[in-house]
């Protein structure tokens, strides 16, 4: 399955968007530098030079993949496939091995690549959930701009009524994008904010309602209870809502992301993911672990590659693997 877009925009526009793509690509690449360096160190010159493949090359590659948090299962699957191809003489040197590795990794991430579509309902209600500090509020701010640029009207709901300054933080993003923010004072009922917001969004014919939620309450059980309540209350107005529940994950947390996926998915059924901070010291391998989850299949709608408003991009498996495996230069 490929979601490659065929662009029909005029050459000039395309040049502009390629330039932007280039900038984001290099940021992604820089962000993945740590993971990439681990890979490169582990496999010597595998990613750069061309030499014969022997057992030590394969051993080094296996260790390198494990170090980058790709996960035991993915690593052993990938290594078994590569070893078989080497035995069949299909891969004759490290350059060919590199290409085969890229292909196998991309194949695993391809199912995660899906676009967020907001046309099926009006208003299209999207909850953003996740532990504190992962980038929920920032992602909402960035996404509001992208949706507007795509011609959609947007409203924000300040559902994090727990943390001091959370409402103000969302209001700042609202002002920056010139979109309405529905809010109540700190300490109010989060479900009541979401309820008000959905009513208002319906009345105004808003296309997309982005609902911010708390990352921390007194304890985890309370946080999950609150999410369930917001979910329930919103359904009183629109039984089909929320249309998406997006879990935001900090790309630096490694395997811990898996327990966050499971934990939140038990409280409110998730429909997609955003992986933030891939410009930082991301443990990029965790995407493979997410892709390999046996019972939960979630698309990665976006990746965050910085704190600024334009630092959000759609996840593309091939770009991601290229950034991961590309050589140090350039
Ligand atoms: N470098 C980098 N920083 C990010 C990214 N996304 C968010 N941040 C930063 O991470 C910090 C936390 O972001 P928030 O959006 O406040 O996170 P949150 O999930 O809303 O946090 P709580 O409201 O406390 O639950 C802020 O300093 C953001 O600027 C990203 O993609 N890259
Ligand atoms: Mg927040």
Image (cartoon, rainbow, N blue to C red):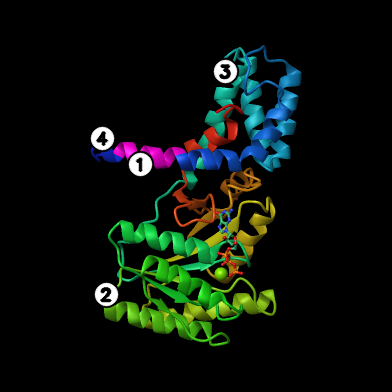
State left or right for residue 196 relative to residue 272.
left
Mark 4, ligand 1, within 8 Å: the answer is: no
| Whole-percent x, y for residue 194 in the image | 45, 80
- Secondary element at tag 1: helix
Label 2 vs label 4, nearer the camera: 4
Where residue 284 sits, quadrant-wise, is: top right
Q: Residues within 10 Å of mark 2 (few under 14, many from 20)?
A: few
Spatial CA span between label 2 and label 4: 35 Å
- Secondary element at tag 4: helix
Lower position in the chain sequence, tag 3 or tag 2: 3
Answer whether residue 18 is magenta in the image: yes
Spatial CA span between label 1 and label 3: 32 Å
Q: Which residue is mark 4?
A: 11
* Residue lying at 63% horizontally and 32% vertically, measured from the top left: 78
* Residue lying at 72% horizontally and 20% vertically, measured from the top left: 57
Q: Which residue is mark 2?
A: 205
């Amino acid at each position: 399955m490929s979601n490659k877009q065929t662009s029909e925009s005029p050459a000039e526009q395309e040049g502009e968007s390629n330039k932007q793509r280039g900038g984001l690509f290099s940021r992604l690449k820089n962000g993945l530098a740590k993971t990439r360096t681990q890979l490169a160190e582990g496999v010597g010159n595998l990613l750069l030079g061309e030499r014969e493949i022997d057992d030590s090359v394969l051993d080094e590659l296996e260790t390198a993949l494990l170090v980058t948090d790709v996960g035991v299962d993915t690593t052993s699957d990938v290594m078994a496939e590569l070893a078989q191809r080497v035995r069949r003489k299909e891969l004759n040197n490290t350059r060919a091995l590199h290409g085969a590795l890229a292909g196998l990794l991309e194949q695993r991430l391809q199912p995660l690549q899906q676009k967020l579509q907001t046309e099926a309902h009006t208003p299209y209600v999207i909850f953003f959930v996740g532990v504190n500090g992962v980038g929920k509020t920032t992602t909402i701010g960035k996404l509001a701009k992208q949706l507007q640029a795509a011609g959609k009207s947007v409203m924000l709901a300040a559902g994090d009524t727990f943390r001091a300054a959370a409402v103000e933080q969302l209001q700042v993003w609202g002002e920056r994008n010139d979109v309405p923010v529905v809010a109540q004072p700190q300490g109010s009922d989060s479900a009541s904010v979401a309820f008000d917001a959905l009513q208002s969004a319906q009345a105004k014919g808003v296309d997309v309602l982005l609902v911010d939620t708390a990352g921390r309450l007194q304890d985890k059980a309370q946080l999950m209870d609150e999410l369930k309540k917001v979910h329930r209350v919103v359904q009183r107005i629109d039984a089909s809502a929320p249309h998406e529940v997006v879990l935001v994950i900090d790309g630096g947390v490694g395997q811990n992301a898996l327990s966050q996926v499971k934990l939140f998915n038990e409280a409110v059924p998730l429909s997609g993911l955003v992986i933030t901070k891939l410009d930082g010291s991301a443990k990029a391998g965790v995407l493979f672990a997410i892709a390999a989850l046996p019972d939960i299949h979630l698309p990665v709608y976006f990746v965050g590659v910085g704190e600024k408003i334009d630092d959000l991009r759609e996840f593309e498996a091939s770009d991601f693997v290229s950034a991961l495996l590309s050589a140090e230069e350039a």
